[in-house]
Amino acid sequence: MENRRTVQKKRKKIKDEVPIKDFRQECREFAKSWIDVHIKEFKRLGVVGDFENYYSTMSYEAEAQIVRELGKFLIDGSLYQGFKPVLWSTVEKTALADAEVEYLDHTSNTIYVAFKVKETNKDFLKNTSIIIWTTTPWTIPANKALAFNSNIEYSVLEIDNLEHFKDKKIVVAKNLIDTITKECEIKSYKEIETFKGTEFKGTLCSHPFAKMGFDYDVPMLDAQFVNLDQGTGIVHCAPSHGPDDFNLCLNNNIPSLYTVDNSGVYTKEVPYFTNTHVFKADPIVIDKLKEQKQLLKKR
């Protein structure tokens, strides 16, 4: 179907202006042409099969059977509308299979961001900021939680003031202190507390953009996928934009919202950044983090 859409563009047609019925029919014809090619090539290779009665997901018989099975779920009350993040083409406005995605070398914007502790039952966590590291700044507006690992040791550091960041106490994984202080150009610091991740239980943080309309609690959640390979030992979670984040938040009754539309722009669910394309959002998000003094470092 990808090639067919390219042909339509060459014919000066715009996908969204092609009637959906006509578009789907052309897709069927294109898919059928390649099925015929595959059958011919299989036969040349000596593959034996019932090529007259082959199964294809687009056959009307298969589609009818899918509807019948869905009907069974509908009747017994187990049919529901779910929600999950998927690989998506903002150009073609369609979902992508894993096999359709090729990853090229890419230099990302790397940032260390602070989430101020808002509520905690541990005195040593009061007036601290939890530090996260991410290579996708554009997902910060969709943040709903922070993930830690209960088996990891964390430390509270008292640091010198940095540009765009005035908090005195930060929290990071103990084993990553040397890497973090070097990358964030923290000249001097004092380790004032070390504790196990289990101590985070019940801690709530504020979103870095709390003063920009993101005035909701950001809970800290235990997650085994958090490790010490890179970052700070705490992972920022945007459930609308990653399977690990999605599943963790789902298990903790944190809903995923429709934060980015089919064309790749933030929806009204994302205050301030609404209608900004995610591919152009990084510098805007980074500038706002600086403005809110929640950016520890950009690399």
Image (tube, helix red, strand yellow):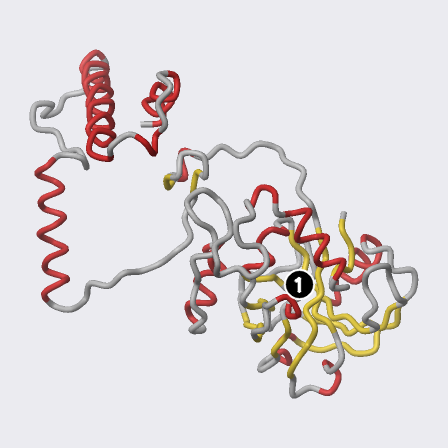
In this view, the residue farthest toward the front is: 17
SS category of the residue bearing label 1: loop
User: Label 1 amino acid?
Assistant: Gly
Q: Position of residue 233 (x, y in %)?
A: 66, 63
Q: Residue at x 84, y 54 (%)?
A: 182
Residue 68 vs 205, above or below: the answer is above
Residue 121 vs 114, above or below: the answer is below
Q: Nearer the viewer, residue 200 or 162?
A: 162
> From this viewpoint, is residue 283 visible?
yes
Q: Position of residue 284 (x, y in %)?
A: 67, 50
Q: Position of residue 97 (x, y in %)?
A: 37, 39
Locate the N terminus by quadrant: top left
Q: Residue at x 24, y 32 (%)?
A: 19
Q: How many marks?
A: 1
Residue 73 horizontal side relative to residue 240, left or right: left
Q: Name the residue that disc number 1 marks.
A: 233
In this view, the residue farthest toward the right is: 188
Circle 1 packing at 10 Å, graded few (<14), some (14-19), many (20+), is: many
Q: Nearer the viewer, residue 108 or 190?
A: 108
Q: Quadrant of residue 159?
A: bottom right
Residue 32 vs 140, above or below: the answer is above
Q: Nearer the viewer, residue 44 or 137?
A: 137
Q: Position of residue 191 (x, y in %)?
A: 84, 73
In this view, the residue farthest toward the top is: 44
Residue 55 vs 36, above or below: the answer is below
Q: Nearer the viewer, residue 228 or 131?
A: 131
Q: Residue at x 58, y 55 (%)?
A: 273
Q: Residue at x 67, y 38 (%)?
A: 107
Residue 125 horizontal side relative to residue 5, left or right: right
> From this viewpoint, is residue 219 visible?
no
